[in-house]
Image: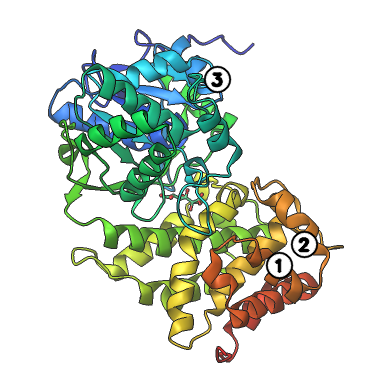
Amino acid sequence: MTPVLPRLSPTTTPRSTLLHDRAPAETGIVHLGLGNFHRAHQAVHTAAALAAEDGPWGILGVASTSTTVADALRQQGLRYAVVEISPDGSRVVVPAVHTGALVAAREPEPVLDALAAPGTRVITLTVTEHGYTLDPRTGGLDLGHPGIRADLDGWSGHAAPKTTVGLIVRGLQRRARTHGAPVTVLSCDNLLHNGRLTGALVAEFAAELPRAERDELAAYLPAVTFPDSMVDRIVPATTDAYRDAVATRLGVCDTVPVPAEPFSMWVIEDSFAAGRPAWDRGGAVFTGDVGPYELLKLRLLNGTHSLLAYLGALDGRATIPEATARPAIREAASRVLHDEYLPTVPVPANIDLGEYVDQLFRRWSNTALGHRTQQVGSDGSVKLAQRVPGPALTHLAAGRMPHHLALTVAAYLCCVAPPAGFDPGPHASAMADPARSRLAPLAARPPREFAVAALGTGLLGNELAGHAGFTARVGALIDVLVRHGVDAATREAAGAPVPAP
Ligand code: CS2
């Protein structure tokens, strides 16, 4: 009979797994987005920072709507394990930095109170690209988004905000009204200039409010900083294998452990209005300009990752390492990275490019991690807008056709809006994407028309949609993918360059 293990808790946590020995009592950070990424990245860096320099930097974690993680954390005295998986073995650590766990949709008032508390000096975000309610056509706030509309319509009646931007604005308004103390809003999502963008979205939302509230916020916003940051750690979804690993290694039951690769990187613009943990002593790098690090990571890692995910899924591969092991897909990944992303990236002086790229391929090949193509491929409509248009337009403006960027878009469309009669397979079919219902009716058209119509929805911004040569190339590659499969499409993309019209 399997023994019933005690639940992970402050009393059952083995001391040797704790990253620091004194759990913080005070909340200095309110974090929106209590998913795996935050718990394996910011929480771990914060624990390491607190081990080096103590301070009032406990994290109150806020989930948006899902109650699973918040409830489990509460049952576990806010403890959970991070299982670091490398091909040579694994290590289990317990960050122990959270001071509370809430769910915004269920308990909005305590969340707003926490955002407004004078002790809260940093508000951090990992709400994914999807959570920023962006309009891909303008790159600004999507004022037609149902959540944003609901937040604005319910504003005067004090309805609880449903969107991240609405929640932040309401929290900042409370701060302005109660004490006016400065605060920093730190985005930790994969968006270009994520801090500046968050500041702009907050300002755009505030501009829609009634006059008096708009003025009140305009007077307070100069006390708020929005630093840019680049975050990097591959964090798969939790499976029973990781729950079992914690049970075996620690002898306790943790229902919400987080798997992660050993690698972790965090580059932050040092612009904090009211102090911060000593994250520099916890593995983060501070710099005046995060831009080059963001571009490097968003394009080389995330952009190539998308190609691996879509081609991999179409080729029947469940995981990124399985996709990377396929010679044709690996070659396409190498081409998109070296020929199409890299020339558009200013490499930061302290990065050894050869080592960085070799390391990327090693990270993607970490079979023990089991990072799924379905996970990386999900939400492509919001992710690709951050990864593809900038580099594609750079090449097109120089008269070069970026064939592998076109292949990325073609493979994406085949996965989430499969043309009539085409079965993209189980991994693609399982990809979640908010644009599925918008794209599906277009997929009945012949490939070239489908590509024009799909990009015409504003998926990758207006400029790329208007580039007939690019949409034609996407259409041609959809045709090859559907009729001849992944290998043929990679050969087609690698063929003699077709001059851009
Ligand atoms: C991935 C990222 O899902 C995705 O789109 O590209 O989550 C990636 O694993 C992380 O950004 C790595 O830091």
Where residue 342 sits, quadrant-wise, is bottom left
Q: Tell me the SS state at disc 1.
A: helix
Left or right of 241: which side holds 172? left
Q: Please name the amino acid that badge 2 sits on.
A: Leu
Q: List the residue tagged with mark 3.
A: 67
Give the percent coordinates (x, y) of residue 250.
42, 20
* CA separation in Å, label 3 and label 1: 38 Å
Q: Which residue lies furthest to the front in this view?
A: 211
For the residue labelled by badge 2, is the local secondary structure a helix, a strand or a loop?
helix
Evaluate if marks 1 and 2 touch, with contact meaning CB atoms under 8 Å apart.
yes
Quadrant of the rendering where the N terminus is positioned: top right
* Label tally: 3
Secondary element at tag 3: loop
Measure the C-alpha gap from mark 3 to mark 2: 36 Å
According to the image, label 2 marks what residue? 442
Please state the horizontal and vertical placement of residue 203, each as a whole percent of the image.
Answer: 35, 42
Quarter of the image with the C terminus in it = bottom right
Identify the residue shown where x is 73% and y is 49%. Answer: 437
Q: Toward the viewer: 404 or 64?
A: 64
Question: At label 1, which amino acid type do we have?
Answer: Ala
Which residue lies at the image location 22% right of the left edge and 18% below the top edge?
118
Residue bearing the label numbered 1? 453
Q: Position of residue 231 (x, y in %)?
A: 34, 47
* Residue count near mark 2 (Cα–Cα under 10 Å), binned few <14, some 14–19, many ≥20: many
Res 69 visible: yes
Residue type at the position of mark 3: Thr
Q: Specify which label sits upstream in the sequence, 1 or 2.
A: 2
